[in-house]
Amino acid sequence: MNMHEKIAVVTGGAGFIGSHLAATLLMEGFVVRVVDNLLGGKREHVPKGAVFFEKDINDTASLTEIMTGASFVFHLAALPRVQYSIEYPVESTRVNVDGTVSVLKAAHDAGVKRVIYSASSAAYGDQDTMPLTEDMQASPKSPYGLQKYIGELYCRLWSETYGLPTVSLRYFNVYGPGASAEGAYALVIAKFLEQRALGKSMTITGDGTQTRDFTHVRDVVRANILAAHSQKVGKGEIINIGSGQNVSVARVAELIGGPVEHSAPRLEPHDTLADNTRARTLLGWEPSVLLEDGIAELKKIFSL
């Protein structure tokens, strides 16, 4: 292996966001090593050209070996299901908290230059004011939200105590091609598209007035790459990655088009809306995909 090769490790690279990121890194000339235990990810999602390791992120020794020589580690591996975390708090903590500590330890031991951690807007829980800014007190409402928040704290600790450069990106409702219709990323968009493709009505929980800040996966990928290179981060900063606009679930159904039915409301924040000033300032990032365009592209994929 020549000395000039740029190597990146993507944990969770067989998942929705991780596979998009791995593909983009390959296009940018990186040697990409994907680590995934295929619990949530699928082998066929790993892009051609990436080196695939079917490993558990709690296997710290294997991770250290895989990370040796890498400049960047993008840590996306998680059990990203709110409902699952409520039912299985022990198992989800093992992956989302212990797994993150294992990734940080391995990255430090392997001499990695920076860890870019996929955090979640679930850390905010329900807040009285919008938009959500990074300096608000975290108030997670599920084990998943708490686990992802603890991961941010560990990243900052690893920067302060061990000198490992880290940065945490809090994603807001990521959608796009390949998004699963199950899990926490079962965003309503993927769900609605699947229902329409099967000729069913779209199921709106509650009255549909609840809003979400939908962020396209391509914008999330770009944020990760900017976070790897930015000179302004590396001390465990927390950065919102959201479009800065929120849209009601009823409006999403309207954009997709077709019959709707309503089901009982569920326990969830009524609104999410990111303040993305920090992403603009520290990363030079701004959203580029309009929701209307993102949904139009998905409708083509689903032949709707």
Image (cartoon, rainbow, N blue to C red):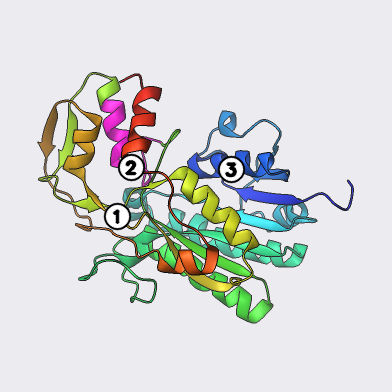
Q: Position of residue 74 (x, y in %)?
A: 60, 54
Name the kind of residue labelled 1 in the image: Gln
Q: Are marks 2 and 3 in contact (CB under 8 Å)?
A: no
Element at label 3? loop
Image check: 249 left or right of 82? left
* Quadrant showing the C terminus: top left
Q: Is 253 or 288 nearer to us in this picture?
A: 288
Q: Is 20 or 34 nearer to us in this picture?
A: 20
> From mark 1 to mark 2, how far is it between C-alphas?
9 Å
Q: Residue at x 47, y 64 (%)?
A: 280
Q: Are marks 1 and 2 in contact (CB under 8 Å)?
A: yes
Q: Residue at x 50, y 73 (%)?
A: 153
Nearer-N-terminus badge (1/3): 3
Nearer-N-terminus badge (1/2): 1
Image check: 107 left or right of 36? right
> From mark 2 to mark 3, how far is it between C-alphas?
25 Å
Q: Is 223 or 160 nearer to us in this picture?
A: 223
Q: Position of residue 172 (x, y in %)?
A: 37, 54
Q: Taking 288 as reference, is 159 above or below it?
A: below
Nearer-N-terminus badge (2/3): 3
Q: Looking at the rendered structure, which numbered label has been put on residue 229?
A: none
- Decide: few, some or many residues near mark 1? Use Cα within 10 Å; few <14, some 14-19, many ≥20: some
Q: Looking at the rendered structure, which numbered label has been put on residue 13?
A: 3
Name the kind of residue labelled 2 in the image: Leu
Q: Taking 234 as reference, is 32 above or below it?
A: above
Residue matched to label 1: 245
Residue matched to label 2: 291
Q: Which residues are magenta?
A: 180-195
Image check: 70 left or right of 290? right
Frontmost of labels 2 and 3 is 2
